[in-house]
Each structure stands twice: as C-alpha cells, then as structure tokens.
Image: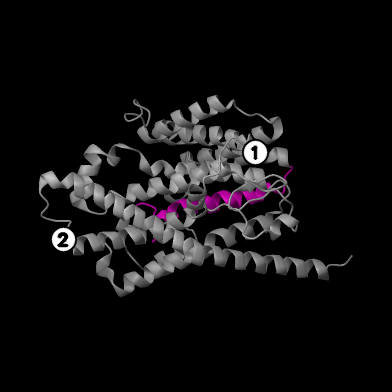
Amino acid sequence: MPLVATDEPSGSAAEHREPPHPVSTGAAARPLLGIQYLRAVGALLIVFFHMTIQIPLYTGYFNKFVLGQLHLANGVDLFFVVSGLIMMLSSRRASPGDFIVRRMIRIIPMYWMLTCLLALLVCWRPELFRTTALSWEYLLKSLAFIPYANPAQNGQFFPLLVPGWSLNFEMFFYAVFAATLFLPYRTRLVAMGGAFGVLLAIEAIAHSPTLGFFADLRLLEFWLGMLFASVFRDTKLRLHPTVAAVIAAVGFVWLLVGFPRAAAAEAHVQILLNSVLPAAAVVFAVASLDLGERIRKISGFELLGDASYSIYLTHIFSLGIARIIWVKAGLAAGTAAAALPLLAATFALFSCVFAVAVAVLVYKHVELPVLLRLQEAYRNRRARRLERAPA
C-alpha cells in the first residue's frame, strides 16, 4: 500500500532526497526496512490469493490441498495497520492540506491510470474479462473512491479495479486523519478512536449499505497502528528481539491459518480474531525490531517493498495475461489427474513471477518517475508560494 513518509517538517532538507524511501521515519529519515518487507509480504499474499482463482481446473486443487487453506486475502490487513503506524510516526508537524496533497500524489496517479486502462481494455476486448461491468457511473465512482454495489462482483462493494476497494478504505482513513491534524499531537489518537466509534455506532442504528462499507472492524487496524506509533514514540518501548521475533512469527501463522474456533462466530468476531488481532501483532513486533535497528537490509526484498503498490495494482492485469498464455498453450484443459499437481504448481510459479516482474518494471519506469515529478512540482509550487509570502 502507498506510503511515503518522513518525520521532517515540510520544506526541510529531507524532502530533497531523491528518490524518497517509501517508508522512513526519524530525523535522518532512516528506512523502516521491516515495515517495507511487510508491505512486500502483504502484496505477495494478495497475488497468491488472486492467482488461485485464475484457472477453474486448478482452483479446486489449490483450495483442497494448498493455498486455499490459508487466509491469503489478509495481506490487506497488514497494509492497514502499517498505514496507521506510518501516518502517526511521520505527521507530527504536518498541516492537513500538505498531508492530503502528499497522499493524493502518492495514491491517485497509478490508480487512475490503471483504472482507465482497465476501462479501455473492457471497451476494446470485453471477451477477455470474466467479471467486469463497465458504465460511466461505475468508472467515475471508482476514480472518486466512492464505494458502490458492483453487479459483476455479486453486488459487493468493489470498484472496477477490484484491489481498489482497500484504497477506498485508505482514502477514508486519510480524510479523517487529516481532520485530526488540527488537534494537538497527543489528542489525535483519542479523536480518531472517537470518530471511528461514532461511525460504528451510527451504522449499527442506520444500517446504510454505503456507510456499512466503511463501518468495518478493520478500522481498528488503522487505529492500532496509530496506537503502536504513539507507544513507540512516547515511551521508547522496544521488545526484546527474541520476544519480538516470536510474536511476529506466531502472529503471521495466526494471520494465515486463523483462530480455530472463529469459523462459527459472527462475521465481526471473525474479522477481529482472524484479521485485526494477528495483523496488529505482526506489525507491532516488526516495528519494534525496526525501531531497535534489528532488521537487516535485503536489497531484493526491499525492492519488492518499494514496488508493493505497483504489485498490488497491476497483478490483476498480469495474472490475466498469464492465464491467457496458459490457456492458449492448451495447459488448462484435458489434464490427467496425475499431472494436475505439477501443472498447478508450475502455473502458480509462472504467473506469480510474471506478475512481480511486470510490477517491478512498472514501478521503475512508471510509478517512481511520475511520483518524483509530481513531488518536485509540488515542492516548487510551495517554494514559490513561500517566496511571495510577506516577511
């Protein structure tokens, strides 16, 4: 998910480092490598999740024996906790307007480009898409981050570019968070918790479908990330490395496997037990290791963290292309039962590697250049405004 953050005040020398590290904090803007790695892990889990449904012949195999037994979609929950953590760490002296502009620069260009590309492809070759309903209303609502009941997704609140549902959540969080920036730093956490609590209470009474989309217990993930940032910053708490590593490992297994007795519980309880709590445990432990400078640099994995936004947004396209290639090669039908495991595993490897490779290229040649150019334009505009301001 999209994060560009430093703890420097606007206009400081930290803004002029090129390129800015997507996840950084502190006076020297030291990268939080562990958080970067979590972004990579979260994006890859979503790629695996969507890979399993590309070829119906393989989906049953995956669901029965391998990836279908894991909660791969919970990679998004890691993003939400990380988002709350980084926003709280990085915006102590940020103004609401500056914060919103920087978030828009980070999120909107790639999302709009790929959503419009999807719309054009649907108009050009609709037969290539299995579950896409296009209209001007759906396109405009998708671009504006407005949830709507998508008829191509069984009425679920997914935009045209399906992974964008989480960006609707992110933008809502940013809007509420920006409002708290008018308040003293130490009251923002309470204000955000109060705002989320009021939203959940109103939805419980009103039962509005659109309001219900945002009134989700996953809002706790943003708030918990903010809480962790406050604890780490104000108390200087750091877990013992061994304790943190154990918590991270247990939390990650919990995130993928789920709480054994949660399956029979109500939906909100399942979200709390199988998504919110394990994701929070993982991020808390990794952030403790990060801030204690216990995370080693792994360049390749760091690159995947840098490219995680591109991975998240482009993988739907890449997996579709991989599926078409596989079908054209005659590998998706008439397969003997004995050969199915090998073919399914080969497709999984091929499609996921292809999706990641495409995303890294998009990151290097599209996302990063556009981001840097827009950030530079915004800095220059702000500098000109300061020059014209009266002394």
How much space separates mark 2 and mark 1, taking CA atoms? 55 Å
- The residue located at (45%, 30%) in the rendering is 249
Rendering coords of residue 112 (x, y %) = 48, 65
Amino acid type at circle 2 is Gly
The residue stretch that appears in magenta: 156-184
Q: In the figure, 173 relative to 291: above or below?
A: below
Identify the mark at residue 365; answer none if there is no mark: none
Which residue is label 1 attached to? 189
Q: Quick one: label 1, few (<14), some, or many (20+) residues within 10 Å?
A: many
Tell me which corner region of the image, top left, top right, bottom left or bottom right, holds residue 229. top right
Q: Quadrant of residue 33?
A: top right
Relative to residue 86, is residue 160 drawn left or right?
left
Q: Which residue is mark 2?
A: 330
Residue 115 at what x, y percent from top left?
Answer: 43, 65
Residue at 62%, 37% (x, y): give it. Answer: 293
User: From the viewer's perspective, is residue 123 above or below residue 252?
Assistant: below
Decide which of 109, 35 is in the foreground and name it. 35
Locate the C terminus by quadrant.
bottom right
Q: Give the mark count.
A: 2
Task: Count residues near mark 2 (Cα–Cα under 10 Å), then give few for <14, some for 14-19, many for 20+.
Answer: few
Inspect this view and state whether residue 209 appears.
yes
Residue found 46% across the figure and 42% down from its top: 77
The answer to whether one can see residue 159 in this image is no
Residue sitting at 59 percent across and 49 percent down? 23
| Foreground pick, 380 / 243 | 243
Position of 51 relative to 133 (above/below): above
Q: Is residue 179 found left or right of 336 in the rendered image?
A: right
Q: Secondary structure at mark 2?
A: loop
Q: Nearer the viewer, mark 2 or mark 1?
A: 2
Could you tell me what secondary structure mostly forms the magenta stretch? helix
Give the amino acid type for the residue marked by disc 1 in the picture.
Leu
